[in-house]
Structures are given as structure tokens and as C-alpha cells.
Amino acid sequence: MVADSRLPNFRALNPAQRWDFLANACGLTDDDRALLKQPGALPVNIADGMIENVFGTFELPMGIASNFQINGRDVLIPMAVEEPSIVAAASYMAKLAREDGGFQTSSTLPLMRAQVQVLGISDPYGSRIALLQARDQIIERANSRDKVLIGLGGGCKDIEVHVFPESPRGPMIVMHLIVDVRDAMGANTVNTMAESVAPLVEELTGGSVRLRILSNLADLRLARARVRLTPQTLATKERSGEAIIEGVLDAYTFAAIDPYRAATHNKGIMNGIDPIIVATGNDWRAVEAGAHVYASRQGGYTSLTRWEKDNSGALVGTIELPMPVGLVGGATKTHPLARLALKIMQVKSAQDLGEICAAVGLAQNLGALRALATEGIQRGHMALHARNIALVAGAVGDEVDAVAKRLAAEHDVRTDRALEVLQELRAKG
């Protein structure tokens, strides 16, 4: 277990020193350490078995979000992402949050849905009852396909039947298998179960089964996080904590009522979540799809987070969203860095991982709202973007930091200005 997620002076180290610090803090093995000592941690021969037509690999920067305390436990969070300011913003919000107790999280059971579409019926409501009457038989058939999952306490637990009496293709019913997938993401499991029950469904309804596939709206597999920050914690030299709280509430309300703002607001939340999904080899497209549909579940697209002020005047933020992530199967087992990321976080279950994602998404959202409510989003973002601009301008080695610091100090982060600064430095050198 990581003793302290604050990582003092971590930013001042170079990448090799950071890796040694991290390896010591997490008790990583020599084999773990060797993974990142050289580029190309994913061998091409392994990549070739993961997808089709492989000709190489593509790397992203991998950083560590620090300061996180979740349910009283310090957690170091690997994030694979290309955009500047994401890791820094999450880490800084976690630093503020830990002063008031950090993040509290919870989650539901890892239940996924498999959908079985039935057409060619004239009595959809009667067919629905026929399927519900055969519930135990259908569950037994589904569970015959995965004895290992059953042995772990998972498996198909229930069914639902949704009726669409009118559609452009005639009456339709859709049966859902409700499957506890344990520590798997679950796509292959539920798809196999859906295919296995199709003949029985046709026999019971007299209809024709068409699609048999999971739903990425994992609305029974939710992760939740909560954070509470006092005005004293949020106060800065320029603004009182009370003023910042009011600004955050104004910014949140904008996202809650306007889908144009909500799209950007929720993208910022996913800025925190997606890099963890990528780093652990999970399916970020599935998580994105489920999150955005969940944000529309009440008939209009709105914020995934909620921000309020409690009776004491403290700011309270919460998030709840589908989190179909796994620790077994797919890239989480085949990609060496995905396994390493899970080891660094020391998660015990897929539910733990989902809760960490929810906490980081909430922190990322707080960082964006706080910036918007104070100096604006660009000041901090562009200062961190300065290193990237320095690289684009052609800076190398120590020139990168020198150019970046000058751009940040001038609040003028542009490629043409970076070229000018670089030329000046080289002329002096």
C-alpha cells in the first residue's frame, strides 16, 4: 500500500528519477522497473496478437496523478494522455480535497446487460409474459456457457423484457439478460450468453431473434464519488472561498441547463477518466458511450456531476455514472503497462477501479469549474502547454524548460513567439 500519494518534489525530478521514486514507493519488482527503462514497453509480437494488421505501436505520455485520498486510502493514479494540464489539474484538486478528508466512493454490483432482439411476432405483450414465465430456464441456459464465472459468484441473475409494440419493422420485444460479470468488463461473456439463449427465445415466442449483443449503457453498473470542500480550503490570495464556491455553482448551473455547455463540461470530466481507462487497457469508447447516454437519461443532455452548497457553506460535489471496467481479459492482461498500472493503483476489484475513475473525474471537473470561476481556463492550461509549444518550435534538452518558462512568464504561449525566444537563447549561447 502506498504510504503517501503526495509525492513531494516529484515534478522537479527527471522522468528516470520519477520512475525510480515511484517504483520504490509502490514496491515494484526489477521486472516492473525494466518495463519503462526503455521505450517500447509493448512488444510488436504481443501487439500483433491484440488487433489486426499490426505494423507498429503508438505511445502516449504516461503520468501519475498525485495527492489522491479515496475512502481514506492514498492512491497513485497512472494516466495515459496527450493533453497538458489534465494530470496537474487532477493532482491539485486532490491536494485541496485531502485537506477536507479526500474523496468518498461507492459502487453497485458489476451488472451488465445483454440484449436479445425478437421480431416477427404479432403478440408482443404475450411473448413478454412467456419469456418471464421461463425466466429460470433462460437463466440456466445462459449460465451453462461460463462455469468459471459461476464459480466466482457471477453469472446471469435475472431477465427483463422490453416491449416495442410499434416500430418501422413491426412489433418488437427485446429481452435483457442481467449478468454479474465480476472483475471482467464483460462484453465477451454477455455476448456469448445472449447467443446461447437465442434458440430458446425463438421457441418460447415463435419469433425470430436478430441482434444478440451487450448494451454499453451499463446503467446497473454504477460508480459514485463525493467530495466536500470548505471555503477555507478553496480560498486564494485573490478571492475568498465563498466567492469561489458561488462561481463554481454558477458554472455548474450553466452546464446543468444548457447542452452546449454540458458537452464541454462532461468532456472535461472524461479528461480525468479516459486516461485511466487507457492506462489500464480498458475500453474507453464503451465508457464514453455509456457516460454520455447516462447524462441524457432524463430526456435532455446535462451534467454528469452535481455541485451544491451544504448548510455549513461548504461546496459538495457528486458524480454517478456507468463504469464498465475490468481487471481480467483483453488488453488488461496482455498489455504489460496495463498490468503495471493496475499494480501501481493496488486495486482489488473492478469496482475499486471504477470508483477511482469516478473520483478522478470529479476532481477534474472541480479543477475546470474552479478555473472558469476565477482566472479563466486558459491561464493555467497554456502555461502547462508551453513545453509542448517549445518542442514544436524545435527546442531540445534544457532549451525546452527555458523557452517554456519564458512563454509562461509572458503569458504569451504561441509557436511564433517560442521560435523568437529560442533564437534569442541560441544567439546568447
Image (cartoon, grey):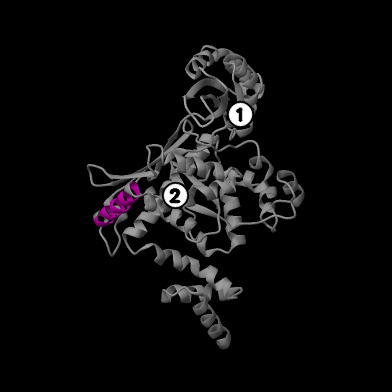
Question: Which residue does the image show at 42% across and 56% down from the upper left?
Answer: 92
371 relative to 426, above or below: above
Estimate the x, y position of residue 266 in percent, counting from the top left: 43, 49
Residue 83 got which mark? Answer: none
Q: Residue furthest bottom?
A: 427
400 relative to 191, above or below: below
Nearest to the observer: residue 190 or residue 395: 190
Nearest to the observer: residue 165 or residue 3: 165
Question: Which residue does the image show at 23% across and 47% down from the upper left?
Answer: 313
Query: Does 424 appear in magenta?
Result: no
Residue 269 got which mark? Answer: 2
Question: Which residue does the image show at 36% across and 59% down from the upper left?
Answer: 371
Nearest to the observer: residue 180 or residue 336: 180
SS for tag 2?
Answer: helix
Write down the region rendered in magenta. 243-256
Residue labelled with disc 1: 212
Quarter of the figure with residue 193: top right
**Residue type at tag 1:** Arg
Estimate the x, y position of residue 178 in percent, counting from the top left: 53, 25
SS for tag 1?
Answer: strand
Dot placed on the residue nearer the N-terminal end, 2 or 1: 1
CA separation in Å, label 2 and label 1:
31 Å
Estimate the x, y position of residue 303 in percent, counting from the top left: 38, 46
Quarter of the figure with residue 376: bottom left
Q: Residue furthest top?
A: 133
- Check disc 1: other Cα within 10 Å, few if <14, some if 14-19, many if 20+: many
Estimate the x, y position of residue 12 in percent, counting from the top left: 52, 64
218 relative to 202, above or below: below
Q: Is residue 403 left or right of residue 409?
A: right
51 relative to 405, above or below: above
**Residue type at tag 2:** Ile
